């Protein structure tokens, strides 16, 4: 069974974002499997790099949409993205220095942050877009 299973409640009603969230969850699962099966440190580093790169790409997509929709909560939302990116960069650095075993605690952080963010701030954006489109 997947470490993090996609649930329909994670849908925020914005297709591109929902698809990217699914992909993000896939990579988190891939990372979990890599560390669970005792894959080489190099493979774990590669998968964490992949997660970091995809996260940056995904956040850039959301940020373009915030600008396009003149989303009033952009500043707060961007601050959340930044704190996650900073944390992932820290994990990457620690892992590359060999000082961090990709612990269950790290995995839990990645999982919990992602789901809390999707169900909170991302859903809020989805609702904002839906209301705006109804009003226009
Ligand atoms: Fe977001």
Image: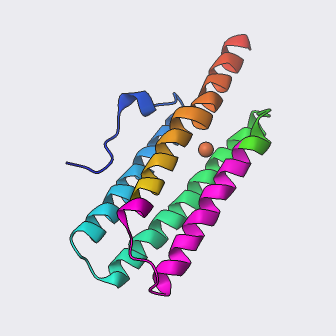
Q: Quadrant of residue 76?
A: top right
Secondary structure mostly seen in the magenta stretch: helix
Identified at 53% across, 66% down, the residue is: 53
Does 25 sit above or below residue 119?
Answer: below
Nearer to us in this view, 69 or 8: 8
Q: Position of residue 90 (x, y in %)?
A: 58, 72
Q: Quadrant of residue 37?
A: bottom left
Q: Which residues are magenta?
A: 77-106
For this view, does 102 lie left or right of residue 83? left
Q: Quadrant of ligand 1?
A: top right
For this view, does 63 lie left or right of residue 27? right
Identified at 75% across, 33% down, the residue is: 69
Identified at 34% across, 78% down, the residue is: 43
Which residue is outermost to the top? 135
Identified at 41% across, 60% down, the residue is: 105
Specify whether residue 30 is painted magenta: no
Q: Position of residue 52 (x, y in %)?
A: 53, 66
Specify whether residue 88 is painted magenta: yes
Does 116 sit above or below residue 87?
Answer: above
Q: Quadrant of residue 14?
A: top right
Does 9 sit above or below residue 36?
Answer: above
Nearer to us in this view, 107 or 45: 107
Nearer to us in this view, 132 or 120: 120
| Residue 27 visible in rendering | yes
Colour scheme of the rendered structure: rainbow
Does 108 sit above or below residue 115?
Answer: below
């Amino acid at each position: 069974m997947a470490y993090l299973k996609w649930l329909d409640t994670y849908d925020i009603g914005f297709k591109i974002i929902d698809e990217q969230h699914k992909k993000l969850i896939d990579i988190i699962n891939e990372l979990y499997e890599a560390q669970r099966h005792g894959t080489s440190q190099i493979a774990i580093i590669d998968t964490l790099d992949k997660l970091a790169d995809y996260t940056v790409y995904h956040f850039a997509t959301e940020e373009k949409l915030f600008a396009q929709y003149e989303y009033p909560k952009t500043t707060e939302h961007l601050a959340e993205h930044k704190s996650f990116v900073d944390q992932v960069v820290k994990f990457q650095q620690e892992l590359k220095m060999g000082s961090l075993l990709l612990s269950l605690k790290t995995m839990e952080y990645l999982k919990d942050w992602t789901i809390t963010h999707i169900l909170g701030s991302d859903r809020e954006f989805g609702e904002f877009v839906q209301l705006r489109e109804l009003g226009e």
